[in-house]
Image (cartoon, helix red, strand yellow):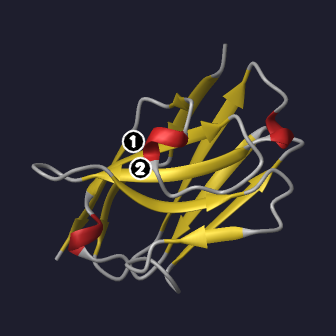
Amino acid sequence: QVQLVESGGGLVQAGGSLRLSCAASGRTFSSYAMGWFRQAPGKEREFVAAVIGSGGITNYAEAVKGRFTISRDNAKNTVYLQMSSLKPEDTAVYYCALRVGTYLSSQGGRYDYWGQGTQVTVSS
């Protein structure tokens, strides 16, 4: 069984930064891809970013390219999402997810475990 616990969300002004963390337990963390997704009120969940087990390859949604950075520290079983130049449209609940597989995916259905989410609110 895998447990994922996100932290680091909060309220920030537009143009500001936040770093989200997701701590994992229960599996060999470094073997699996990790992703971040978000869901705004009244909208469907959407892909944000993903990183392979080694951390060497990443993928981003177009909406966050150049502003967000995904990284991982396998020694700490933790994946991060550094968010900069935040915009009000980034407001959402952010979820981390673990994929029991090697390759990246932007499809939520391909992820096997999910955290409980952390709220990010960007004020204008």
Please say whether residue 76 is visible from this viewpoint.
no
SS of the residue under disc 1 = strand
Q: In which quarter of the image is the N terminus?
A: top right
56 to the left or right of 38:
right
Question: How packed is label 1: few (under 14 Cα within 10 Å), some, or many (20 or more)?
Answer: many
Residue 71 is situated, as x and y percent measured from the top left of the image, at 71, 61
Q: In which quarter of the image is residue 85?
A: bottom left
Residue drawn at x 43%, y 80% as measured from the top left: 62
Disc 2 marks which amino acid? Gly
Please say whether residue 32 is visible from this viewpoint.
yes
Residue 120 is situated, as x and y percent measured from the top left of the image, at 33, 54
Q: Do the residues labelled 2 and 1 touch (CB within 8 Å)?
A: yes
Tell me, for residue 73, which label it has, or none: none
Residue drawn at x 54%, y 63% as measured from the top left: 49
Disc 1 marks which amino acid? Thr
71 to the left or right of 91:
right
Q: In which quarter of the image is the C terminus?
A: bottom left
SS of the residue under disc 2 = loop
Count of numbered marks:
2
Q: Which of the two residues, 36 or 18, is positioned nearer the viewer here? A: 36
Residue denoted by label 1: 118
Residue denoted by label 2: 9
Can you name the residue that lies furthest to the left here? Answer: 42
107 to the left or right of 79:
left
Residue drawn at x 53%, y 86% as measured from the top left: 66
